[in-house]
Amino acid sequence: MQTVDFTPMMRQYMEIKKQHEDYILFYRLGDFYEMFFDDAQKASKELDLTLTGKDCGQESRAPMCGVPYHSAESYIARLINRGYKVAVCEQTEDPATAKGLVKREVIRLITPGTVMESSMLEERRNNFICSVYLDSRAAGVCFCDVSTGQMHATSLWGNGVLADLVNELGQYMPREVLLSDGAYSNPELMDFILGKLESHVEQGGEWRYAPGAAGERVKAQFQLAPEQTEALTAHPELIQACGALLSYLQETQKGDLSYISRLELYEQGQFMELDFVARRNLELTSEMHTGNKKGSLLGVLDKTQTAMGGRLIRRWLEQPLLSVPQIQARQQAVQALLSDEMKRDELRELLSSLYDIERIMGRVVFGSAGGRDLRSLREVCLKLPGIKKILASFDNRYLSALSAEIDLLDDVEKLVDRAIEPDPPFSIREGGVIRTGFDPRVDELRELLQGGSARLSAIEAREKESTGIKNLKVSFNKVFGYYIEISKSYLDQVPESYIRKQTLTNCERYITQELKELEGEVLSAGQKDAALEYELFCSVREQVAACSGRAQRTCRAVAAADVLCSFALAAQKNRYAMPEVDYSQLIDIRNGRHPVVEHMLKDGLFVPNDTYMDGDKNRVYIITGPNMAGKSTYMRQVALIVIMAQCGSFVPAEYAHIGVCDRVFTRIGASDDMSSGLSTFMVEMNEVADILAYATPRSLLILDEIGRGTSTFDGISIARAVLEYVADKKTLGARTLFATHYHELCELEQPDNGVKNYNVVVKKRGDDIIFIKKIVPGSVSDSYGIEVANLAGLPDKVIRRAKAVLKDIEKKSFRPADAAEIAEEPAQCSLEGYAGAKILDRLKKLEAETLTPIEALNLLYELSRKAKEMEA
């Protein structure tokens, strides 16, 4: 588009827009951010803004829409959440003093992964941006949360590099991913990022990933320890990923990145590996179908009081430890907090009132923090001595170390208290933010703004003395400004230097050169005060920013204390036990419970179960039993107990001994992947292939009904082959829970091959069954499919026909349905009538004297649930 015919302002806009073509440009005009042309049309549609026009020097007016500058955050947040990027263009000189067109420049580029504003962030979740370097040899991946200053990086290599890369991305769930050309051209990686993570993708360009320039950026940004330098040198892909991300952040943030001062390098083998499928199936941090936290393990364990703790507990659950000493250190800290409820409650009370200083300090260093942020920071500083003292009072090494890490930041507290008003305005550019007494220049300007009472009194006293006029008054009003008022009886004593201003009935009003100058000072005092206060505030903010390293250490310690308190409270409320953890192959759980199902089961009684796996004679469980009996719940609970134990949490069991697992794999259910054209069976086989490729003898495998997505004979064949592979120590020999309806597999149990048969107890009385949900040794030969269908409420005629067909199949004499026979069956009047009849029939057949207490409770719960469903 030619710009020569545009107005000067529009030419300026077009030049800035040309440099940021893929951003929506928020162009500051007075009190509004305006958008023009295509940006205006997009924004008006996305933000429900009225589309207007502006004269631009062309025949047709430029499409235009705008938002007030003071409420722009909410509009920008909506655009970011819908996948747009925003460039914020500000006036960089005072319009009152500008000669000609006011200078403007882009001060910030906002993308999904570089958001800093609290209104655009989820409080208890990190907002990661990620950089990926990928070639045929290795991958480097770097994650950064700009709002907190955290940066983590690792390198991946070997045959499974792509699968490992996908797992890392699935763990951090970045909102934005920067890709090297090699990564961008990988279709499998792109499908995962766009399809599963739904992240925004940026092609980084090879110049960002050039090793030399990337290395210089990393060295300039961080003070690296010798071992970090050695690791980076050995793995250039790490340097390339980190350097490219720093380049992108410098380009978008256009400000100080000193808050990102600590690069945390980690290696495979430091944490338990949990792939995307396992996290989803086990519902670690969100419920599978709704995405809500409530139905997840995080929802049960997260009783943290701070946003920092909320983010850290999520990371701990996603990164279970492999180091037994580290696990035990956390456990012992939880035990100490559990043992002294009074101290723990006092600590939690202090934590409950803490603001999110991790993100506040991020805004301070970046230069976007306001007066309210600094006052919030001071309030946190006032609580730190109490937190530090309580942690130090525990006889526990871990808690004492956390106490030592907490810096009281008393210099920050004192500076903010002296400098910033207790209730500062939202804006820092309009005055009123600096506290009276902090700077005499501000005090003087404020006095002028309030009428300059002290100077007026001094002038009045001096003029009275010099003229001898005792009733001379120096006053001010908005119409005439400053003046000297003299009654008419003293007019003969008025000096010649006085200039008549106004004549009244009883007096005359005059001005002097001194009063004119005072008036000019007052008129400009507002602007001067706002400018001076902004300058002073920025200076204070910079002094606070210089303490960012100390504040970050404090944040990490406070967050860890919060998570440990959360684990202790969850253990107390839910009757959890401290597990023994070591490097053995043992998984010994007595009366274990599913932490989430137990938590959600408000009106029922959860049936606990034992597990004993030793990696030798009790290595593989083949679990049979009907659907709805609790097989999947049992297997998930074993996996969750292992994960909880390796996070340092107590576990839902009477006793547990956990030998550290390097990975947990799950194959539990599948849904068709319509976007990629994969069937249920293909998804299942892909997941099984990944498990067999990457599992080790120290892994825990949860396999549910392998082979059910194909024909019976094919399914049995595949399931048996997989089972033999995982059970045989020569091929894998991993600890495995294998649920199946293929009872033919039960013959694999042999005295010395480590395979054991287990089943879920079911009581059958006539046509009815009761799920006891108890796992016991041995196998069953019946899946009770028709009985389960009967419980689900299928019409009687369908149930009877199913039984007849089953008998025919068992006799090898299957016959097609007799349409006339089915037609004779009476139609059901209503679901409610049918359900009520079923409950009544169940009660009639009940032999109460034969029921065990647990059977009676289960039956009562089941009948109550069915009755409530009838009302609904």
Image (cartoon, rainbow, N blue to C red):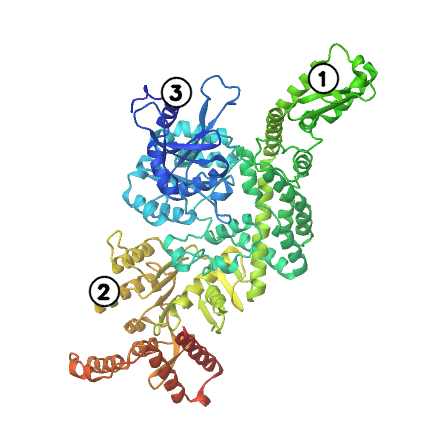
- Who is closer to the viewer here, 254 or 857? 254
Q: Which mark is residue 831?
A: none
Q: Are marks 2 and 1 in contact (CB under 8 Å)?
A: no
- Single out the mark in the foreground, 1 or 3: 1
Q: Please say whether residue 155 is visible from this viewpoint.
A: no
Residue 778 image point, x, y percent: 37, 76
Q: Which mark is residue 710?
A: 2
Disc 3 marks which amino acid? Answer: Pro
Disc 1 marks which amino acid? Answer: Tyr
Alpha carbons under labels 2 and 1: distance apart: 104 Å
Residue 739 image point, x, y percent: 35, 68
- Who is closer to the viewer here, 295 or 82? 82
Alpha carbons under labels 1 and 3: distance apart: 47 Å
- Check disc 1 and report the residue beneath it: 510
Is disc 2 surrounded by few (<14), some (14 to 19) or many (20+) residues within 10 Å?
Answer: some
Among the two numbered marks 1 and 3 on one chain, the one whose residue lies closer to the N terminus: 3
Q: Residue at x 38, y 70 (%)?
A: 631
Is disc 3 surrounded by few (<14), some (14 to 19) or many (20+) residues within 10 Å?
Answer: some
- Check disc 3 and report the residue beneath it: 8
Among the two numbered marks 3 and 2 on one chain, the one whose residue lies closer to the N terminus: 3
Is disc 1 surrounded by few (<14), some (14 to 19) or many (20+) residues within 10 Å?
Answer: some
Q: Are marks 1 and 3 in contact (CB under 8 Å)?
A: no
Query: Under tag 3, what secondary structure?
Result: helix
Among the two numbered marks 2 and 1 on one chain, the one whose residue lies closer to the N terminus: 1
